[in-house]
Image (cartoon, grey):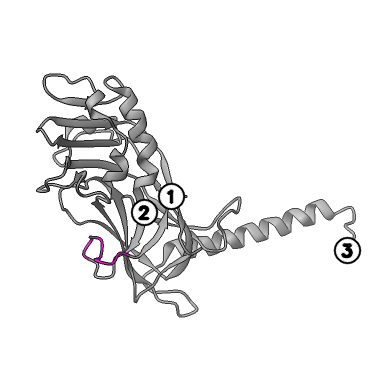
Amino acid sequence: MTWGARAPRLESVLRRSLTLGLVAWGTLTMCACSSGTETGNPSFEAALGYTAFSSEPAQVGLPASNADQVVSNAWLDLDAVALVVAGSCGASQPIAVSVPALGVGDHAAGKHNVTRFQLTGATYCELDLPFVQATAANADQPVELVDHSLFVRGALADGTPFSILSSATPTVHLSADAGSFSVTEDSPNVLIAFDFAAWLSGLDFASATPENGSIIVSAAQNPSLLARFESNLPLGVALYRDLDGDGKLDLAPVRLAHSP
């Protein structure tokens, strides 16, 4: 086909029509309205949970464990999660479903941190999890978290307390293990899991300079340990199926996506 003098204008109209169509389709996907779509694809309640575990429980453990390093609290401030629809990964403008932000949560205290949202069911190839800095203190978070995105607190085997304060705001990108994963009405629960052993891997607390009997890892104190911790962050995040919807890793966990 040969474009005439009006080709630029016609091409612009066609491009605008295509763009509007994609935006409308993406909006419908993200809305997942409770009444369902006109094609009879009803929405359902899905759940994105958050939990913590240790892949090396003898070295790094959660409260009440006898590990060499025990993490007692891990406050994180998390923004809205993007589930990228399969087929659009790698596109300049991928289509994504936005899951509401969890906000601040303590992920080492055994709480069931979860965000429930409406979905029409789809297949996804990627997930993006943004960390953000807390802007104000409230009753549900420690004052140390203000202007930080992560505040981890724990103790070493000899009882020495340690804390890690990070202002890093990465967006952790997870790619589907099998190319894609689905969230359906029959399997609506998925779980982001933080591996504390991966996060603390290689942190030589013995080389740290303590202050008043405590080890503080921050931009001002023991910054080399903070740099190692922040480089470990993506390696300690993965997405799993939550078959029973209890907000914890299943006995035989099914991993859906991880950091490449």
Answer left or right for 34 relative to 213.
right
Badge 3: how crowded within 10 Å, few (<14), some, or many (20+)?
few
- Identified by mark 2, the residue type is Ala
Which of the labelled discs sits on residue 259, or is there none? Answer: 1
| Secondary structure at numbered mark 2 | strand
Q: Earlier in the sequence, mark 3 or mark 2?
A: 3
Q: Earlier in the sequence, mark 2 or mark 1?
A: 2
SS category of the residue bearing label 3? loop
Residue at numbered disc 2: 238
What's under tag 3, amino acid-wise?
Met
Tell me if 123 is positioned left or right of 160 in this view.
right
Taking the image as shown, residue 100 lies to the left or right of residue 161, namely right
Residue that carries the numbered disc 3 in the rendered image: 1
Taking the spot 25% from the left edge, 61% from the top edge, the residue there is: 249
> From the viewer's perspective, is 176 left or right of 115?
right
Residue at screen point 26% across, 20% down: 221
